Image (cartoon, coloured by chain):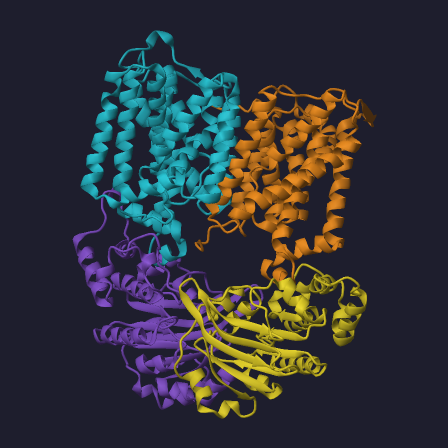
Chain colours: A yellow, B orange, C purple, D cyan
Amino acid sequence: MAQFEVDDVHAGYDDLPVLKGVDVSVEAGEMVCMIGPNGAGKSTLFRVIYGLLSPTSGEVRYRNESVLGLSQRALLDHGIAYILQRDAVFPDMTIRDNLEMGAYTAPDGYDLEAQIGQMYDLFPMLEERADQNAGTLSGGQRQMLEFARGLILDPDLILLDEPTAGLAPKIIDQVFGKIEEINETGVTVLMIEQNVKTGLQYADRAYVLEDGQTRFSGPADNILDRPEVRDAYLGGGTDEADGEGGSEARL
Amino acid sequence: MLELELGLISLGGRLSLVPQATVTAVVFGFVYALVAAGLALIWGVADIVNFAHGEYMLIAMYVTAFVASGFGGGASPVVLVPLNAALLFVLGYATYRLIISKVMDAPMLAQIFATFALVLIIRYSALFVAGPTTVSIDNYVFEGQTQLAGIAVAHPEAITGVVSVAALGLLFAFLRSTRTGKAIRATAQDREVAQVMGIDTDHIFGLTWGLGLAAVGVAGTLVATFSPIHPELTPTSWTLIAFAAVALGGFGSVLGAVAGGILIAFVENLGAVLLNPSYKELYVFVVFIGVLLLKPEGVLNRGDA
Amino acid sequence: MSTDTEGETEADSATTSAVRTDAASVLEVDGLRKEFGGVTALDGASVEVREGEICTLVGPNGAGKTTLFNCVMGAFPPTAGSVRLRGEEITGQQTHETVQSGLSRTYQIPRVFPELTVRANMEVNQRHGDESVLATVFRRTDAETEGDIDRWLEFVGLASMAEAEASELSTGQQKLLNIAAALLRDPDVLLLDEPTAGVNPGLVDDIAGMLAELNEAGRTFFVVEHDMEFVRRISDHVYVLADGTNLVDGPPEAALNDPRVLESYFGR
Amino acid sequence: MATAVGDRLTTVWTGLDRRHHLALAALVVGVLAVVPLVTNNEFLMNTLVLIFLFGTMGHGWNILGGYAGQVSLGHAVMFAAGAYTTAILFVYYGITPIVGIPVGGVVAAVVGLALGAATFRLRYHYFAMATLAAALIVRVIFFRWEWVGGATGIEYPFAELGTLASLTFRGNLPYYYLIGGFALLTTLFVYVMDRSKLGTYLKAINMDQAAAESAGIDAFRYKSYAMGLSSLITGVCGGLYAQYVLYIDPASTLRLLRNIDIIMVAIVGGIGTVLGPLIGAGVFITVREYTRTSLSGTQTGLGYVIFGVVLLFISMYRPGGILNRYGGRWDD
């Protein structure tokens, strides 16, 4: 049985349907990459999984248990973390305080200092700048802080939303190196990636989303040679609300 | 035409009043800062403008007056300050949960009118219960004044300044160092990301209202010991002072509001001695409207309604 | 093709430039830059839209397409660069001024006035001049505009819905209403922001048909679009934007089959 | 219950066509016109005069706040501008209020346009706060400005009352027709405006200013039109008020409550609707006058507490007011 399953999820904003039946299934320890053209519904799917948007129908299961409609606290308690894009750090708080907020829902007996120490081991740069405001970090550094903040509760599954968006090519390799490192410690990774080629090099499997539906899934190798994948990008398909307009508005 | 009536005192005479006015400005500056910090906190975190800010202060003032007269001045402000802070905290939390949370996602008009409704309810309940007369607390606990290099410092005002600074210090320490305080700041910076961290933002908004009004509770208790209380005039001027301070300090910034509060006190008191004392409140309003109109960021209508 | 793009692009489009109409250019965007805070959303993009053509702008996420639209329309001023409409400088004009100068736009997510009827939504888009207060209080439209409203509603197939409240329309119908409203002012260039986004396949065909018909009648379009099939179908000329600047441009097949385009979509 | 009544009213009104509207209006005007012939009850007449006056002020506020969406908390300034202009022209210069009231309206419009030019750049609560601050500044100045009577204000000279040139009367009846007539005129005006270009543009700006600008609308221009008309009507109401109470002072014309009264009638009745201000004034004034007389003069507080509660419930559960614009069609 898969560790995490998304089953025929439909969702949208007002009367604008965005997800029109998405199925995803992830095995424990896997690294799965979700690709697809602009606005195929990838980010919307994550928002549904993480309780920020209510689906109109469908089911999300984690270890055979429905996790749809749970609070974010409950999802964290289940061991599911959502790691947002680099602009989601709290810019006017120090790096250390950002990490502390990542552990906001920590259970009794949780050793915050030890966990922060572990994160500093994994991302030494963060320790050097522990008392700087996160707003002073570069894009790549913020992404590292995002990782650390999302990992601080030792999740079993992380949802990664475009970890390399807007980063320089040199940094992208570092970021993927870290993701691979994290994955190798046994954390399941489900990520959305715009840098398709690089993402597929690292992932085990890939899903192609197009027009709010799962179009194709399979091993990450050679997926780009498949005609239906190229079609998804440069062929048909329509768009959704949170496409480019959304990401540019955040700038 | 409008005469500014600069008074009979010469410029030299007026200048000699500056040191005294400066001291008064410092003292009042801190209490203005405290009230403004409360407003800025609510504004910055929950993105709601509390038009009833002065009315909540009125509640604390009436409680103080009631205790002072009812118990013959026996209850010390040492007890009253935390008591009023706690009372206003509870009122603030309840206000959020019962009322404000219902209009958080409503049209802007509904948000303005919800807190405006609170203005009417609190102010006229006070008028109904306490009557239209001005209440003054005489000789309550602190009395007298001290002369320092020719400048008179009244004890109630001096203590108000000191306690306001202490309360501000506590507020900042709470926001800087505690887990909950950090969660409040996190929620202010990005509500959705805070939610993803598992922070119950609705509870945080309630706490913010509680804290913001607790600050007002402290200020109200202190100000009541030397300033007359009137159900209609008192809240209006305090709300406007807080608005002006928040506008000066950059909307929603607690630290900025503190600086703004102090600046407002200086404008008011130095304006009173250098220009015309009877237009004291006018200077505050003029600064306020000036800042609103000149402020380039945040407040402008850029058509993204 | 315009000489203001990179040298390497020119080599590519050399073979294709003959294909493009040599009609006069209507809208010229030259070296447009836009920075938000420290982030550069547009980094010197240049576009030329010629009389009577359907010119399309494509590019991966974050390429700057919507920012370019917003700068051209005057939603915010560009950091640098210029926009000219029929040779006249309109850079830095506010939105209502660019519209009065002869541009019209639609939105990716349709924007209607939900509590107004379809007809009143059209009336909002009638021509605005220097009318006095009383002229605006005691008049609704003139007979000519009235006729145009009926004509355009008929054209997009919303005539039967004229008296319905706009909030009752489906997303697709709202898009059609936006198009009809934009046409009402008879613009020099009509900017369409993702006309097929959130629209069912049947309606995509209808929209493509309408554009072809209008284009046939001499109207000029500047379109941002994700749906490449649609782009291929309607475009006379395609610009590909990446990282806020020009990557390739030319006739649809040539531009979209350029290896650099796939690369920009797929990353390295 | 109240919401159900409001919904019913909304449905009935919007379900009728223009002829029915006019027939219904004629019926109501006819009934109101003969009321004084049937009764001369002082309380009833006074209440009706105040309903006309406040309903008209509500119309004035509504053009700017309800249609254009600029929430002014400072309309007392325009009210005072009209009242003071009328009173000063008459008391100081002997100019008849027949001239003074329109001049007062124009002065108010000029004041309003100046205020608008300075503040239309502001949005949402910043605009509300700026207009409130403007009202407080004007209040402080008028309290201390001796030429306009300072805190004591201006009183109409007793000897000159009752003449046509003074436009003052003994008894309520002439005021009933004078103010009622202006209320009718204003209502007809708003009815026409609601369906006009201006009405449509203002609603569009209110709903989505960016989209309205994309339609080529110069938002500043039409907001200024709204401000001018709104201020003109409010200023004329100020002049009529001065004629009715025969003295004006800063406390009655410029206090915060005056701002609230003006807004209250529009909100309770239904912002952005033609009949909302009249219905709101009917409810508001009736309750206010009733609580004032039945609960003795000193305890005016209670009436406002009740209004506070009403306003609170409206903002929480029915932000559109009794005639709910939201969810009902806005234009015809």
Quadrant occupied by the N terminus of chain D: top left
Q: Is residue C54 left or right of residue C62?
A: left
Q: Residue C214 sits in which quadrant?
A: bottom left
Q: Is residue D117 left or right of residue C150?
A: right
Relative to D190, residue D201 above or below: below
Residue shown at the point (64%, 29%) measured from the top left: B274
Residue shown at the point (31%, 87%) measured from the top left: C18
Q: Nearer the viewer, residue B25 or B128?
A: B128
Residue shown at the point (53%, 79%) measured from the top left: A24
Relative to C241, residue B111 above or below: above
Q: Is residue C254 left or right of residue B99?
A: left
Q: Nearer the viewer, residue A226 or C47?
A: A226
Is any part of residue B116 visible from this angle?
yes
Q: Is residue D173 left or right of residue A187?
A: left
Relative to D32, residue C40 above or below: below
Residue D248, image x, y percentages: 43, 19
Q: Nearer the viewer, residue A102 or A57?
A: A57
Is any part of residue C2 visible from this angle?
no
Residue A64, image x, y percentages: 60, 75
Q: Residue D26 sits in which quadrant?
A: top left
The mark tally for this picture is: 0
Residue C201, image x, y percentages: 33, 76
Q: Residue D111 sits in which quadrant?
A: top left
Residue A27, image x, y percentages: 62, 82
